[in-house]
Image (cartoon, rainbow, N blue to C red):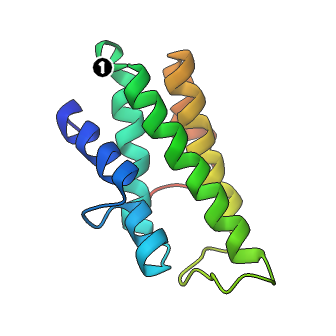
C-alpha cells in the first residue's frame, strides 16, 4: 500500500468518514472485516515508511485503537443498546493484530507485524 493512501485511510478512520472501519463501527454498528484489513494494512504501511512517522499519525492510530476498544466494550455492555452486527467471535485475534501494529508503529519494529506470528490471517 502506498504511503499517501495509508495516510488517507488513517485520516478517514480518525474522522469516521468514507466507509472507513470506524465509520462502519460508529455509524452502521457493523464490523466490516474488509474495512478492518484496510485499516490494519494502513498502519503496517505507515510503520514500514519511517519518514512518515509523526505525532499526528500516532495520535490518529491511537485514537482509532481507543475507539475500537470502546465499541467492543459497548457491544458487551448489557446496559447499552449498542451492538455490532457481524461481530467476530474471535475478536481478540483482531485486537491482537491492531495491538501489534500499534506497537510496531511506535517502536519502529516491523518484526511485530510479521504475518507468520498471528493465528488470524487475512482471507484470500
Residue 18: give x, y in percent of width and height: 24, 63
Residue 33: give x, y in percent of width and height: 44, 68
Q: Quadrant of residue 42?
A: top left
In the picture, the quarter occupied by the N terminus is: top left
Circle count:
1
What residue do we see at 30% from left, 19% from top? 52
What residue do we see at 54% from left, 38% from top? 62
Residue 84: give x, y in percent of width and height: 58, 80
Left or right: residue 112 compared with residue 40: right
Residue nearest the viewer, comparing 76 with 41? 76
12 over 8 or under it: above or below? below
Can residue 10 be seen at all in this image of the molecule?
yes
Residue 75: give x, y in percent of width and height: 68, 76
Left or right: residue 19 compared with residue 104: left
Q: Which residue is mark 1?
A: 52
What residue do we see at 34% from left, 44% from top? 10
Q: Residues within 10 Å of mark 1 (few under 14, many from 20)?
A: some
In the picture, the quarter occupied by the C terminus is: bottom left
Can residue 119 be seen at all in this image of the molecule?
no
What residue do we see at 78% from left, 76% from top? 77
Left or right: residue 54 compared with residue 6: right
Amino acid at each position: 500500500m502506498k504511503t499517501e493512501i495509508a495516510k488517507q485511510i488513517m485520516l478517514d478512520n480518525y474522522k469516521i468518514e468514507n466507509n472507513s472501519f470506524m465509520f462502519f463501527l460508529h455509524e452502521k454498528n457493523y464490523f466490516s472485516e474488509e474495512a478492518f484489513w484496510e485499516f490494519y494494512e494502513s498502519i503496517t504501511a505507515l510503520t514500514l515508511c519511517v519518514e512518515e512517522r509523526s505525532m499526528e499519525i500516532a495520535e490518529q492510530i491511537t485514537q482509532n485503537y481507543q475507539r475500537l476498544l470502546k465499541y467492543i466494550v459497548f457491544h458487551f455492555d448489557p446496559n447499552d443498546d449498542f451492538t455490532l452486527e457481524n461481530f467476530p467471535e474471535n475478536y481478540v485475534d483482531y485486537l491482537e493484530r491492531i495491538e501489534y501494529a500499534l506497537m510496531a508503529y511506535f517502536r519502529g519494529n516491523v518484526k511485530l507485524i510479521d504475518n507468520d506470528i498471528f493465528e488470524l490471517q487475512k482471507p484470500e
